[in-house]
Amino acid sequence: MKSTITSPARRRFLQGAAALGLGSTTLAMLGNVARSGQGPFPLRFFFMFTGNGHLTDHFIPVDTSETAFSFSSAITPLEIHRDRLMLLHGIAGPGSHHQGTSEALTGRPSADIEAGATGGPSLDQLFADRFRDSSALASLELGVDPGNRLEDQITFSASGLPLPAIGTASGGFDRLFGLANEDPAAAELRRARKRSVLDVIAGDLTTLQGRLDVSTRALLDEHLTLVRAQEQALEQPYIPVQCELGSAPTGDGLLATFQGHNASVANAFRCDITRVVTLRVGGYGGIESGRYDEVGIENGHHNAAHVGPGPDLAGINRFHAEQFADLITRLAAIPEGDGSVLDNTVMVWGMELGIGDYTHGREDMPFVVAGGKNAGLAQGRYRRALDRSYQDVLFSLTQVMGLTDVTSFGDAGTQLVEDLWA
């Protein structure tokens, strides 16, 4: 039965509930009503992160009408999907360039930039935990030249530990392939063996705790938390996946990695292997020089951003837009009900810096939001949000994804960004 509560009404209710201090039970009831209108197909979440923000004329449309706007040169590849996406900016983002990466999905500044420590969970992991018993894989973390520094990470567990990204297309494919078409008996044997190994590791770590100093024990506690999280995941019912994934991707170049990851995301959502995927492009400084050579750009993203307006920076941003557009195309081509997988997928392209000359400013944060038609997201729109923070965007996405018992996210995310909805 379709919900009779419209998106604007739902937003007003949520804001009123928060103002009146209504409890999570009331909000959860609304969530059940809202989800009843989504039909038999699940919502998925995809987030692509790129660093270094955008120059003004690389993102702001040439014309500023909400519906009749022209895409700027650096994001023209998105033009073919104008009726499936929204350009949003004007969001205020606190923190610094370095902290911005870890804040991208947590909404909290890193307590220790060099260590990468931050408050978890990141938004994707909040979703992963909620959907954990609905798919074979709670979440998938992918990366294109993602780097290994802790300060580059965007995905964090509930305890604040970073979850590194898979940096090769073959690695992403293998992660899915290992779960697809597996014999149930063999799967249970594999899970039992893994549980046994984790039990031994947990026992060893517990034994070591009493022999260590305070600082070392804290680090050990973090590892033990991860082990226990894996143990809990293995306690979830086994969910078989019967779905053909096609051929494994080949090549390790920039374009091959992007395209391979996009294919894996499409497969993951089509086969319902997971409902939560992140794709990190480089780290807080982006992909460095050498990797863009194959697409005719000799500069690295970080350096090109510091240089400012020029063909290198425009070309890098355009290349990223091409890859985001490619994934939109793939998801839109997968039939689902009366529409497509894209209609049930909330896609977000975000970054850690704002719009403007490269001054490390975060006063005007840009987003591209695509898909999510059946979640009530606005499409074919260019909007500038006022008096809303980056954390408010993250909080609003929890509501879009149906987590209406969540009343805040990050440091200060409590207000709905109504511009997200149709």
Image (cartoon, rainbow, N blue to C red):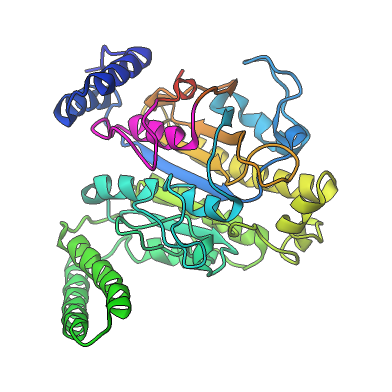
Q: Quadrant of residue 3?
A: top left
Residue ID at (28%, 32%) = 407
The x, y position of residue 119, in whole percent, is 36, 54
Residue placed furthest toward the front: 214
Tell me residue 187's x, y (percent): 22, 68
- Residue 408 magenta-drawn? yes
Q: Along the line of sight, which residue is nearer the eye, 239 or 152?
A: 152
| Res. 211 image quadrant | bottom left
Q: Is 399 a magenta residue? A: yes
In this rendering, the answer to whether 32 lies above or below 217 is: above
The range drawn in magenta is 388-415
In the image, farthest residue toward the bottom: 211
Q: Return the residue nearer the eye: 275 or 198.
A: 198
Foreground of the two, 307 or 138: 307
Instruction: Please indicate, yes or no, whether residue 328 appears anywhere in the rendered image.
Output: yes
At which x and y percent is residue 121? 34, 51
